[in-house]
Amino acid sequence: MNRPLSRPDRRAPYDWDAGEYLSPEEERMIDELEAMLRPPALPMAPYPAKAILLASGETMVVRQAAVDEVDKMLEIIQPLTWVGRDFYDIVSARLFAELLGWKTHRVRDEYCLVGVIDGVLAGIVNGRLFDEKHGISYHTLTLKRGLRVGAHLFAAKMEHHIEYLGQDEVWIVAESPIGHRRWMIEYPLDKKFEVQHELGGAPAWVLTKETYHKAKSRLVTGSRPVSAESLAQSSPIREPDLRAMLVQIENTLEARI
Amino acid sequence: MRDVAIVGIGSTQFGRAQWSLLKMMCEASHEALADAGAGDRRPDAVYVANMGAPRNNKMAGLASALVDRLNLYPAGAETIENGPASGASAVKHGLHAVASGMCDLVLVCGGERMQEVNNFEATEFVSYLSHRYAEYVYGVTLPALAGLFARLYMERHGVRPEHLAMVAIKNHANGAKNPRAHLRIPVTMEGILTGPDAHNNNPWIADPLRFFDCCPVSDGASAVLLAPAAMAKEFKPTPVRIAGMGQATDTHAVHERPDPTELTAVRLASEQALRMAGLKPKDIHVAELHDAFTILEIAESEEAGFFPKGQGHKALERGETKIGGRLPINPSGGLKARGHPVGNTGVSQIVELVRQLRGEAGDYQVPNDPRNGFAVNFGGFGNNVLATVLTRGV
């Protein structure tokens, strides 16, 4: 005997045709769960965009990324998770997870800065607030190498923590020899081995206000304000040519100093 | 003495090698043998130029290893270590072997893999060539020596930081056109010297030298196949003759020279090479000079006789040393951008000149059909220098 496909007298919990996938009861329960899963947030001052004239004569706009740019960044980062050169695999895989955690509200008080050249993403840095006075540096990923893009972005990250977020110190670990030379030696940072950095692994180092201000004239650069035209050009982010990016990451000289 | 021709060339991509030193050398050697169309003909001897393999790569006896890897038995094999001038020294030994009639076919390969160690160690190992008790023990590195040299040279001849930057800009622009160059990044005056962020982009290394005044630490290998000029027709490409070669030495410690800004060994080696070739500096159409530091390109261009003393930077200002200028210098990008795998560099300079003289340099080809090329391979801090003159045809 043929049975009707739907029975108008019993309404299904989900009216898919109307775009309803959860019953009101399920929605309430999930909202409550979600609220428990989401960390509370500290207020964070914004990072004012700046422009840096690179050695190549190109201008890199360094600005704060919005959470709705995460998907695009993940798309760009994903192929790098298979590049072993200079620990790009671990740095990009962890950055991928951190940005995803930011987007899905699973990381507390995270921020992200991007370097953009002519609209094309050149590098990403991120970190978060441990508390009001202590910051945690996460990762620095350079997509355009050989022009100190990573160094400029890391410096911008330190600038954000100390000058705009008003923190006393930033805890840092390096995951590659390049990072160790760039941050621990070049600044130079102090040891903070008694702190367990949440990236685990190596003992933590610290950038204090004093270290920052000593290094500032040497390592922190850029001009403000950024022209409206340049700022507009830096968004939406465009992806670098994948092949060119991979070849450059494989072949370009690592930082020498 | 027989005339000697270069009948085959090869080189790897410069930069940071993904493979072993020996594999890079095999790649360059295979390319040189294939370029020559050598077929089943095997070299009678193999000379390998290298400076740092025992320390950096834990390898010694590279020439024997290369013969084995390429299955070139029973060719004679020797490794030549002469600091950064090892490359041209190895070519000189090849020249002697063929010119004397001792060998007919000689493979000369230069190779260096410097990035197997970190850059502090690389700088340290290169500084081994400074004077042990007068320089090295005081922490004098090659960038430090070049900084001292540059300061005095600039003061004496009116060379300004802009001139040093012009060398970097020119050679980076050339390197950007060379598919095998280590650094293919054009740079601008504003970006490295005069712009608001230049001091961060281009920090001091050894005052007055900045980051972009110094060559990179590179991996790379190059090879040339030498044969008697009379046999050159048996090989595929247009032959290029080694028309002249000169070598001269100077005091080990730079401060012992009567005038530390005089690169006497460059002058003497260049004079010898040109005399042997029967040419004058004005007959040279393209040059590859040893610009490990930007100041050296200016100083060597004067010592080699291309410009009067103290006028090299003026010629640079006038654009005479650009591709398309009166005497293009370092169209390959030079050590500054093509890269400086130290023991290999002398061979790679000759490979690049052969490309120019054959008209095969592609985007960085010097115009007007160059026939005569010139190279300076600078060892130590000018205490052991070789100059080479190449001429198209036999």
Image (spheres, coloured by chain):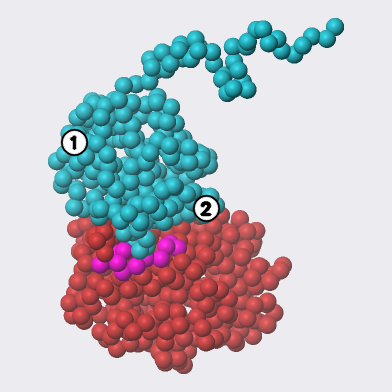
Chain colours: A cyan, B red
Q: Identify which amino acid the numbered label 1 is placed on.
A: Gly
Which of A134 and B234 lies nearest the eye of the viewer? Answer: A134
Q: Position of residue B58 (x, y in %)?
A: 44, 49
Report crowding for label 2: few under 14, some 14 to 19, many 20 or more residues within 10 A (C-alpha).
Answer: few
> Position of A115 compared to A78: left or right?
left
- Taking the magenta stretch, the answer to whether it contains residue B192 is yes
Q: Are marks 1 and 2 in contact (CB under 8 Å)?
A: no
> Position of A243 compared to A119: left or right?
right
Q: Residue at x 52, y 77 (%)?
A: B365
Quadrant of the snapshot with the N terminus of chain B: bottom right
Q: Position of residue A79 (x, y in %)?
A: 53, 42
Which comes before the other along the chain, label 1 or label 2?
1
Which of B75 and B394 lies nearest the eye of the viewer? Answer: B394
Q: Which chain does the residue under circle 1 lie in?
A: A
Name the residue carrying label 1. A166
The span from disc 1 to disc 2 (Cα, nearest Å) is 37 Å
| Tag of residue A241 | 2
Magenta stretch: give its range. B183-194
> Position of B213 compared to B21: left or right?
left
- Taking the magenta stretch, the answer to whether it contains residue B240 is no
Report crowding for label 1: few under 14, some 14 to 19, many 20 or more residues within 10 A (C-alpha).
Answer: some
